[in-house]
Amino acid sequence: MITAFVQFKLPQPLSREEARAVFLSTAPKYREMEGLIRKYYLLSQDGGTAGGVYLWNSREDAERLYTDEWKTFIFDKYGALPSVTFFESPVVVDNTTGEIISNG
């Protein structure tokens, strides 16, 4: 599994309520995305940085999303270009389901 950490500095801080509204407007786009296990939307406490943490089945699945078109979408929506950092995720603890997941 691969975790992608995406972040971008906002041109103007967002309140939690503003961010929630914007995030909810884009969330359906990720519902049926091939290879995406989970996505967390992020907002810094000062509202100046936003982003997401994505858990993917594979790096190939992740790279299908992070295209120039996606970067343009983020820029148009938030006014900032995102950075993407990839991490190997060999073990995930899911306390909601009570599972420890490992992709060997």
Image (cartoon, helix red, strand yellow):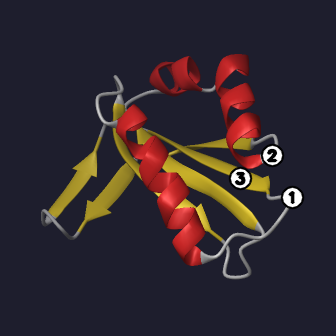
Q: Which of the two residues, 88 or 60, is positioned nearer the viewer here?
A: 60
In front: label 3 or label 1: 1
- The quadrant of the rendering that contains the C terminus is top left
Check disc 1 and give the amino acid type.
Answer: Pro
**Left or right, residue 38 beside residue 23:** left
CA gap, disc 1 and disc 2: 6 Å
Check disc 3 and give the amino acid type.
Answer: Gln
Residue 86 in the image: above or below residue 99: above
**Left or right, residue 42 beside residue 104:** right
Image marks 1 and 2: residues in contact by CB distance under 8 Å: yes
Q: Position of residue 28 (x, y in %)?
A: 36, 39
CA gap, disc 3 and disc 1: 13 Å
Q: Which residue in the structure is indicated by mark 3?
A: 7
Q: Is residue 87 visible?
A: yes
Q: Which residue in the structure is indicated by mark 2?
A: 79
Image mark for residue 83: none
Check disc 2 and give the amino acid type.
Answer: Gly
In front: label 3 or label 2: 2
Could you tell me which residue is drawn at 41 percent across and 33 percent down?
A: 29
Q: Which residue in the structure is indicated by mark 1?
A: 11
